[in-house]
Image (cartoon, rainbow, N blue to C red):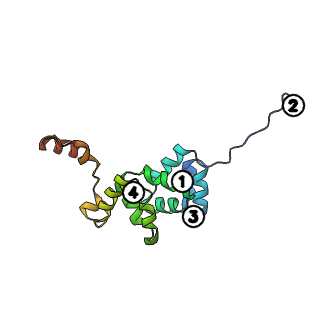
Amino acid sequence: MPGVQSEATDDRFSPEELREVWSVLSHAERVEGFLLLPRNEAEDLFFSLSAAEQAAIVLNLPEGDRRSWMRLLPPDDAADLIQAAPQPARESLLALLDEPTRQEVQGLLAYAEDRAGGLMNTRFARSLGSGSSVPTASTTCWSA
């Protein structure tokens, strides 16, 4: 009818609201709320979570969504997520990564989590190139 507008309500949580109630939600409710967020807001929330919380989200996502969320993470964060996941799920999470990233993550996983190798991010060193001098490499790495 002319002049009559239906009121559309938006029942979605904002990422901030979802984060506020996160600790009282079940795993299923967390995933449900996460999936209701627009992708850019879901990414912001995902990056604010601990590795263990990220693992719980990824493992409870529909099969088709797991790959894109794992591939969104830099290798050091993917390694942290895999280490935080239950042992039986680790291989399946690793298999979601592309081959070069999987190899890098496997290298990071070879180190204990609290040792230098387990804490490092190899992206800076690779971005220098083979022609970089030691002073340039030092400056680049220390400023990062």
* Cβ atoms at labels 1 and 4 below 8 Å apart: no
Q: Number of labelled discs?
A: 4
Give the class, few, some or many, for how many residues have Cα within 10 Å of label 1's Cα (few <14, many ≥20).
few
- N-term-proximal mark, 1 vs 2: 2
Residue behind mark 1: 65
Give the class, few, some or many, for how many residues have Cα within 10 Å of label 2's Cα (few <14, many ≥20).
few
Question: Which kind of residue does numbered mark 4 sit on?
Answer: Ala
- Which picture quadrant has residue 97? bottom left
Question: Which kind of residue does numbered mark 3 sit on?
Answer: His
Question: Which kind of residue does numbered mark 1 sit on?
Answer: Asp
Mark closer to the observer (1, 4): 1
SS at circle 2: loop
Q: Is residue 126 left or right of residue 49?
A: left
Q: Which mark is residue 34?
A: none
- N-term-proximal mark, 1 vs 4: 1
The residue sitting at 50% across, 50% down in the picture is 45
Q: Which mark is residue 78?
A: 4
- N-term-proximal mark, 2 vs 4: 2
| x, y percent for residue 96 | 45, 57
- N-term-proximal mark, 3 vs 2: 2
The residue sitting at 77% across, 39% down in the picture is 7
Residue behind mark 3: 27
Q: Is residue 22 placed above or below 89 in the rendered structure? A: above
Give the class, few, some or many, for how many residues have Cα within 10 Å of label 4's Cα (few <14, many ≥20).
many
Q: Is residue 52 placed above or below 48 in the rendered structure? A: below
